[in-house]
């Protein structure tokens, strides 16, 4: 029997996409508002020692507050992408409604407080949980419910990055692994609906505003090989660091409540000394295209963001790694381009290009979703395809390095840890 398109399911897809777009967009725009308050609080804490103590105590309280959500629903920890994959492949089971509520509350506080965590992974889990809740409301069967979970999870990418094409690639590469032409219709309808709503709520401006030309002259393409190798080794450091950090936290003879407080306490101390470390690192992406900093400062930012990310992400509190890994990738490219510039091998305008290329390659080699990584950077920079072939080259080389050293995809590794902990 020939399967036909269900227009009822198509309508449900559009409704779920619109709902996901509204919820995730509100999640996205609330985070910087909270972070603005935290920024002012840092200024207060830097005035004198008494204010510093008050600032640290406030952060400790925020850590306790987040621990309430984590203790209620342990499956909100981290980015949430492995949890969605686990649910889809019948490896994990949890209450979608509980996850939805606690992820929003815990995620807003953790990410909004300025810890080195991204909004994108949580946005994916929020979308996926919302899709499952609504699918059950519409009384969809098991397979159609899974399709809606995939579709609404992908809405997390389009709403977090304003990147609908990347959302489709993410659904294919990271969540589905395979697709039917009918599922493609439903998933695409959901993403389109979410994208329209997101554009109405937030706008359609690219996340990264790049004024420079991103067309890299052929004479500089030889450097892409070395950039790819550098990024590949960084991805190994990143993934190994997260897995080691997870093991270290697990060995600590303390409760999850204390584990939740640790990153807030440590981050508060670093923020008092350097306010530039606030947030996921999004502010570092623009360095290469504006008033850049010295090479030693770039190295400092890279390792500080890695350290603070490991402290926060590995603790089990809600928050993702998408934007931090992109920010670190941009710093790598900035470092690489700055070194070449100091050696008079490239011009100053090439630094921003290397920065953007390294972002895409860092994502590709860490997550092992190269198509998503490449399209994501193109969409984040406003559809700039003038450097698409260099993106492919650097991403391929960094991917090759990661594979050669048996560096497993990070979300698959994290899912394996969760499954083992559940058994």
Image: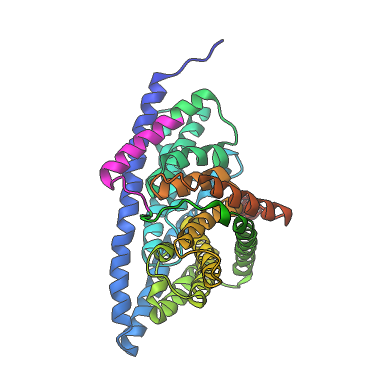
Magenta-colored stretch includes residue 191: yes
The residue at 28%/46% (across/down) is: 203
- Assign the N terminus to one quadrant of the image: top right
Image location of residue 26, percent across then percent down: 30, 50
In-front residue for pair 403/211 = 211
Residue 194 counted in the magenta span: yes
- Could you say which is closer to the camera, residue 172 or residue 284? 284
Residues in magenta, as a range: 187-207
Q: Is residue 411 visible?
A: no
- Residue 32: x and y, percent? 32, 61
Query: In the displayed image of the protein, which residue is found farthest to the bottom?
Result: 49
Q: Position of residue 43 (x, y in %)?
A: 30, 79
Location of residue 138 with respect to 41 vertically, above or below: above
Residue farthest to the top? 1
Instruction: Answer with left or right where residue 283 lies relative to residue 89.
Output: left
Question: Most extreme residue toward the left, as rendered?
Answer: 200
Instruction: Using the image as rendered, state which of residue 71 and residue 167 is in the foreground.
Output: 167
Residue 227 place in picture, x, y as percent: 60, 60
Residue that appears at 28% across and 73% down: 40
Residue 106 appears in which quarter of the rendering? bottom left
In the picture shown, does residue 169 fall above or below 401? above
| The quadrant where residue 119 appears | bottom left
Most prominent secondary structure in the magenta stretch? helix
């Amino acid at each position: 029997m020939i399967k036909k398109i269900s227009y009822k399911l198509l309508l449900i897809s559009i409704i779920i996409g619109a709902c996901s777009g509204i919820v995730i967009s509100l999640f996205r725009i609330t985070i910087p508002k909270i972070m603005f308050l935290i920024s002012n609080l840092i200024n207060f804490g830097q005035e004198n020692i008494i204010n510093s103590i008050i600032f640290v105590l406030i952060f400790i309280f925020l850590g306790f507050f987040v621990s309430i959500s984590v203790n209620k629903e342990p499956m909100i920890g981290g980015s949430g992408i492995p949890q969605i994959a686990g649910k889809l492949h019948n490896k994990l089971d949890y209450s979608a409604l509980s996850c939805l509520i606690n992820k929003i509350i815990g995620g807003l506080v953790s990410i909004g407080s300025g810890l080195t965590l991204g909004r994108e992974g949580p946005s994916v889990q929020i979308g996926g949980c919302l899709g499952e809740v609504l699918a059950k409301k519409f009384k969809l069967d098991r397979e159609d419910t899974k399709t809606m979970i995939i579709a609404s999870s992908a809405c997390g990418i389009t709403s977090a990055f304003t990147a609908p094409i990347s959302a489709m690639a993410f659904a294919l590469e990271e969540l589905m692994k395979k697709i039917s032409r009918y599922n493609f219709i439903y998933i695409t309808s959901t993403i389109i609906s979410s994208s329209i709503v997101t554009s109405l709520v937030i706008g359609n401006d690219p996340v990264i505003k790049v004024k420079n030309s991103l067309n890299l002259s052929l004479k500089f393409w030889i450097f892409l090989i070395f950039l790819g190798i550098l990024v590949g080794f960084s991805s190994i450091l990143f993934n190994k660091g997260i897995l080691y950090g997870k093991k270290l936290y697990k060995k600590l003879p303390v409760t999850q409540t204390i584990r939740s407080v640790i990153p807030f306490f440590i981050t508060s101390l670093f923020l008092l000394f350097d306010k530039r470390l606030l947030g996921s690192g999004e502010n570092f992406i623009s360095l290469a295209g504006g008033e850049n900093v010295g090479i030693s400062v770039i190295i400092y930012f890279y390792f500080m963001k890695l350290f603070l990310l490991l402290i926060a992400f590995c603790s089990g509190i809600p928050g993702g790694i998408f934007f931090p890994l992109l920010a670190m990738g941009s710093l790598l490219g900035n470092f690489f381009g700055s070194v070449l510039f100091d050696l008079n091998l490239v011009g100053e305008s090439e630094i921003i290009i290397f920065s953007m290329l390294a972002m895409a390659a860092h994502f590709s080699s860490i997550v092992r979703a190269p198509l998503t990584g490449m399209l994501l950077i193109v969409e984040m920079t406003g559809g700039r395809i003038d450097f698409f072939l260099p993106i492919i080259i650097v991403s391929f080389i960094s991917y090759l390095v990661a594979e050669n050293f048996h560096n497993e995809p990070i979300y698959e590794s994290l899912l394996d840890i969760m499954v083992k902990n559940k058994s």
